[in-house]
Amino acid sequence: MKTTISVIKADIGSYPGHTRAHPEVLKRAEELLEKAKRNSDIVDYCVTHCGDDLELIMSHTKGTDNGDIHSVTWNVFEECTEIAKSLKLYAAGQDMLKESFSGNVRGMGPGIAEMEFTERTGEPVLVFMMDKTEPGAFNFPIFKTFADPFNTAGLVVDPKLIPGFSFEVWDIEEHKKVMLACPEEMYYLLALIGAKSRYVIKRVFPRANLPENEPVAVVSTEKLSQIAHKYVGKDDPVAVVRAQSGLPAVGEVLEPYSFPFLVSGWMRGSHNGPIMPVSQKYAQCTRFDGPPRALCLGFQINEGKLVGPVDMFDDPAFDKVREECNNIADYMRRHGPFEPHRLPLEHMEYTTLPHVLEKMKDRFSTV
């Protein structure tokens, strides 16, 4: 029997502003998932938050896109939204973009990363959660983990990894996808995923030693602006990554976050800034609603049970990158409303800027 890990998140209200999820919301989510566990809907769960997002990590045996699991999830978000409204939390129900559940939460607002796999003798799984950024923010670290030998030593010294990995890349504007095999198609891959606002790594598959149809990394790719046709908040993606035993080691999966790479999002979803890897304690965005954060919880999977979590970025080894993030934040902030701190105009069509431009359109004259 295969195990499925489902990580489903939503911003259903936070305090103050877009800072963090409320304890009463987290408590109610735990109560509801405990009930689902007793009813055998799920095997195990972990409730947490990254910034203002309520994060549900669930294990079960029902496969991906399962209606029962998604129904449980939608019920959690609905009840927690009512609590958020009663507390007058900010943007209560923000990611609940549809009024009624239709069998699957995809396309309804929440972000989803699910993978089904055959458990190995030892099965480490890392769950990454980001706040104040977009799905393409995972392009850099996922590429580094599974395709860059300067990051992942196993790609050179481990015969199980040398065959490489295949990347499923989505064009989230044209709603198409392509499979690219590395290392031989690495340059094609980079040509796409460097444009992270459009081309997003969705899944990574092994090319040897493990079942080829079972992904070893999955990223949420939901774009709120495409669902709502307006700016309602950043997408705040999540990812699930398996490690060890024919895959990159846990330390190789974490290593890309030792570099403060730039992502889009931050304040009002309209600024570039560094991604800061933080412990759960610091998974809240305050400075200019940021800088964008990355949280990682690690588990061993034992017959579907989540053994953990371990707060993977709660380590002084990441202190230097956090300091660099603050220095980069200082530099970027000094640009104020100028690019490249502010996103290019074509990437701001779903923000509030078009309303400003609309007020000025009749004042332009022909040159």
Image (cartoon, helix red, strand yellow):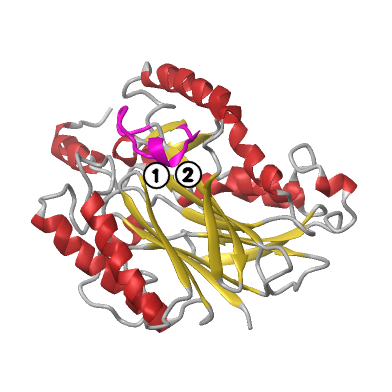
Q: Is residue 73 above or below residue 133?
A: below
Q: Label 1, on which residue?
A: 131
- The secondary structure type at the circle numbered 2 is strand
Image quadrant where one finds the N terminus: bottom right
Q: Position of residue 278 (x, y in %)?
A: 47, 36
The residue at 61%/44% (across/down) is: 141
Locate residue 275 relative to residue 351 in the image: left or right: right
Q: Nearer the viewer, residue 102 or 194?
A: 102
Instruction: Determine the image quadrant of residue 339.
Output: top left
Q: Position of residue 12 (x, y in %)?
A: 24, 57
Q: Position of residue 292 (x, y in %)?
A: 41, 36
- Mark sitting on residue 35: none
Asked if the stretch drawn in magenta spans residue 347, the answer is no
Q: Label 2, on which residue?
A: 295
Locate residue 66 relative to residue 146 in the image: left or right: left
Q: Is residue 166 visible?
A: yes
Using the numbered discs, state the Cα–Cα distance from disc 2 to disc 1 in whole angstroms. 9 Å
The residue at 47%/51% (across/down) is: 135
Image quadrant where one finds the C terminus: top left
Q: Is residue 104 visible?
A: no
Mark 1 belongs to which amino acid? Asp
Q: Closer to the observer: label 2 or label 1?
A: 2
Mark 2 belongs to which amino acid? Leu
Instruction: Determine the image quadrant of residue 318.
Output: top right
Q: Which residues are magenta?
A: 274-290
Mark 1 or mark 2, which is nearer the start of the sequence? 1
Magenta segment's dominant SS is: loop
Is the C-beta separation of discs 2 and 1 under 8 Å?
Answer: yes
The residue at 48%/37% (across/down) is: 263
Locate residue 130 relative to residue 77 in the image: left or right: right
- The secondary structure type at the circle numbered 1 is strand
Q: Position of residue 113 (x, y in %)?
A: 49, 63
